[in-house]
């Protein structure tokens, strides 16, 4: 366990453009472009065109089978059966975030050292950045979205909120996934030292370890 757990610039295109207020800066042009695209997306959603087109694409792809070089895998993720067509080298983390559109799981170090990407697979906590998606066909997966909802936080999520167990929040999803596993593992004792040891694979770069430990201990018995 680590000791830590114990304790766009706005430029014009040329000099002549700088003094010309009628020529928008690149950053403003990007902003206006994004606003325009957002408006188009909202309009499509309102009329149902965008969602209907997306549903049609998904349906067609499902019927046609995976594209060349991809393999269809099926997960039971957060209680729901989902499918994704992935390349052989796609890691589980990328399949969760990009293919299944569950962004709660974070890509941190990408080397299995920080724990930001932790999820539960068949009841065991793993680093999803180190495991290939094709290895988990048929597996049951839980991500941080499966611990609760925005309207009904799970006990670990509620404890993190009450104890301010985060700062930037980037590691929080992985911390919660490991914590929920630890609290359900009878082999891990209740002491502060045992908890810190069990959580040592999760790094908080903000140094909020004290609050994280307090949150986990508060959630004990409620999970």
Image (tube, rainbow, N blue to C red):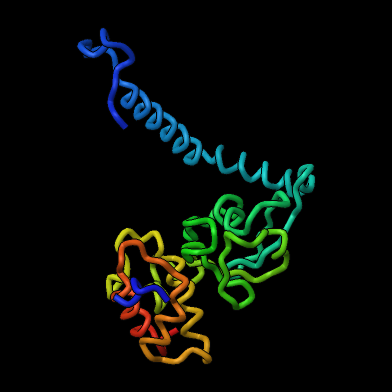
Of residue 206 and residue 53, the one placed in the foreground of this image is: 206
> Residue visible at 52% across and 87% down?
185
Q: Is residue 133 left or right of residue 153?
A: right
> Residue visible at 44% across and 38% down?
42
Q: Is 185 rendered above or below residue 88?
A: below
> Residue visible at 61% across and 42% down?
54
Q: Quadrant of residue 168?
A: bottom left
Q: Is 137 rendered above or below residue 89?
A: below
Q: Is 188 rendered above or below residue 69?
A: below
Q: Is 164 rendered above or below residue 132?
A: below
Q: Is residue 15 left or right of residue 221?
A: left
Residue 91 in percent (x, y) is at: 63, 56
Residue 19 in percent (x, y) is at: 20, 11
Residue 151 in percent (x, y) is at: 38, 68
Q: Quadrant of residue 141?
A: bottom right
Q: Is residue 12 left or right of residue 115?
A: left
Q: Is residue 189 left or right of residue 124?
A: left
The quadrant the C terminus occupies is bottom left
Q: Residue furthest front?
A: 3
The quadrant the N terminus occupies is bottom left
> Residue visible at 76% across and 43% down?
67
Residue 70 in percent (x, y) is at: 75, 48
The total number of labels drawn is 0
Q: Residue furthest top?
A: 16
């Amino acid at each position: 366990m680590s000791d830590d757990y114990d304790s766009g610039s706005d430029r014009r295109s040329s000099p002549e453009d700088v003094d010309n207020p009628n020529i928008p800066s690149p950053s403003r042009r990007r902003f206006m472009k994004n606003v325009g695209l957002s408006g188009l997306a909202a309009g499509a959603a309102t009329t149902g065109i965008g969602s209907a087109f997306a549903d049609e694409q998904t349906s067609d792809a499902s019927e046609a089978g995976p594209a060349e070089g991809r393999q269809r895998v099926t997960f039971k993720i957060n209680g729901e059966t989902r499918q994704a067509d992935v390349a052989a080298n796609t890691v589980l983390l990328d399949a969760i975030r990009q293919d299944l559109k569950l962004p709660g799981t974070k890509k941190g170090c990408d080397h299995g050292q920080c724990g930001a990407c932790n999820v539960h697979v068949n009841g065991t906590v793993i680093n999803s950045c180190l495991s290939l998606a094709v290895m988990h066909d048929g597996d049951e997966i839980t991500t941080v979205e499966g611990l609760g909802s925005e309207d009904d936080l799970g006990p670990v999520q509620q404890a993190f909120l009450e104890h301010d167990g985060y700062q930037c929040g980037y590691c929080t999803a992985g911390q919660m996934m490991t914590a929920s596993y630890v609290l359900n593992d009878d082999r891990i004792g209740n002491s502060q030292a045992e908890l810190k040891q069990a959580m040592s694979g999760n790094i908080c770069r903000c140094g909020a370890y004290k609050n994280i430990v307090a949150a986990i201990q508060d959630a004990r018995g409620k999970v």
